[in-house]
Structures are given as structure tokens and as C-alpha cells.
Image (tube, helix red, strand yellow):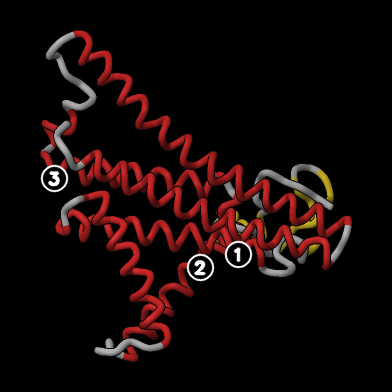
Amino acid sequence: MNISLAPEVLFHIAGIGITNTYLIAVVIVLLALVFGLVLKARGIQAVPTGMQNVTESVFDVWLTTIDSVSGDRKLTLKFFPIVVTVFLFVLFSNLVELIPGLGTIGVYGMHNGHVALIPFLRSASADLNFTLAVAIIVMTSTWIVGIREIGFKHHISKFFTLKNPIAAFVGILEFIGEFAKIVSFSFRLFGNIFAGEVLLLVIAFLVPVIAGIPFLFLELFVGLVQAVVFSMLALVFLKMAAVHH
């Protein structure tokens, strides 16, 4: 049994290593794209059924949730694509670790200087590169929203101001806090999902099949909670960026 913090490189393209976590992230994006195209090809029905019904139910819940935070339907429609995309992407990246054989089916090869099992697929959220990338995208989006909604001058004055020494000091702390949010975002998600991946791997190694079932339900719950927490924090930060004070 091999437990590695770093994702394993499966092959190279133009000198760039393609890892198993990157591969699963690409698969999730492609499946989401196919799902959207199929839904569009079927056409939007006045009385939704099947996939359209499920999709509209999820979107309706998020519209109501975002409305309760933004307090403005116009802002809700601006926040909706970012928040829901992050939620779905993180959710499926988390839950993919529950697929049987994920992380245990692969080939033996050299990894970090020693022979180890290199699994073909690993949960994308168990890769700090993935969680850090999503966190940077979210925080960059908050700055874009802030600049568009209240203007560059007002937005930047939240962090850099000469009104008085206290306001200047607090502004610097707020600016440092923007980077702290990225660290908090990425390590919280990575830590929870990586720990769950290790737990499932250990349980499967020690007591196969039956003993792992309760832990599968636990990881299902954790994966859902982490996706909701990540998305709700993104929503709150977007709302904070869109107001003057």
C-alpha cells in the first residue's frame, strides 16, 4: 500500500507530466460538457422531466440560496454561474473517490525515488494543485466582481487608504486576508478529501468489502458538505466584494 501526497504522473505530453488527478478533473469537465449538450439537444420543456427536472431542482435551490445572501436578483444572476460551477465541480471531484478501484488500480513504477503503485485515477480534490487553482479562481472572481460593481477606486480603497492610520492598518490586514482566504480554501478542501482517501485505502487494505461501507457513507457526507462550504464561502466573499463597505 502506497500513500502519497503528490499526484502520480501517468505520462507526458510535450514534456508536461499528466497526473492521475488532472486526468480525472478533465474527465469530470468532459462529462459535464456532454451532459449540457445532451440537455440542450433534447430541448427545454415547459413541464420538465428526467434530467431537466433534476437540473432545474438543483438550480432552483441555489437561486433561492444566493438570493438570501445577495438580497438582489440582479446580483444573484451574476453570482450564480460562478457559485454553482464551483459547487458542481468540487462536488463531483470529491465524490469520485467513492468509485470502486479508484486509487488502488494501476501499475507499479518509480514514484519519488522508489517503486510504488501508480493508480490510474485519483480524486482531483486530493491534489493540492487542484484545490489551490480553484481557490485562486474564486478569489480572482471576487476582485473582478468588486471592480465591476463598485469601481476600481472604491474596491482598491478597501485595502489601501490614507484616510487615517487605523483605516490604513486595517486595509493592509484585509489585503493580507485575501491571500489567507486562498490558503484556507485550498488546504481545507485538500485536507478533508485527502484524509478520506487515505482512510478508505487503509480500511480496504485491512478489512476488504464490508468494513468499508460505513466509511463510504461518511465520505459521501463529507464530500457534499465540503462542496457546500466551499461554494457558500465563495458566495459570501462575492457579496462582500460587491458592496462599498
Q: Is residue 141 above or below residue 184?
A: below
Q: Amino acid at mark 1?
A: Val
Residue, disc 2: 28
Q: CA distance from mark 2 to mark 1?
A: 9 Å
Coordinates of residue 195 in the picture (x, y in percent): 67, 46
Q: Residue furthest right?
A: 206
Coordinates of residue 74 in the picture (x, y in percent): 14, 58
Q: Residues within 10 Å of mark 1 (few under 14, many from 20)?
A: many
Residue drawn at (61%, 61%) of the image: 220
Q: Who is closer to the viewer here, 62 or 125? A: 62
Q: Residues within 10 Å of mark 2 (few under 14, many from 20)?
A: some
Between discs 2 and 3, the one toward the N terminus: 2
User: In front of the other: label 2 or label 1?
Assistant: 1
Coordinates of residue 42 in the picture (x, y in percent): 34, 91
Q: Is residue 193 above or below residue 167?
A: below
Residue, disc 1: 96
Residue drawn at (65%, 48%) of the image: 194
Q: Residue furthest top?
A: 165
Q: Amino acid at mark 3?
A: Glu
Task: Please say if the residues under marks 2 and 1 sit with CB atoms less than 8 Å apart.
Answer: yes
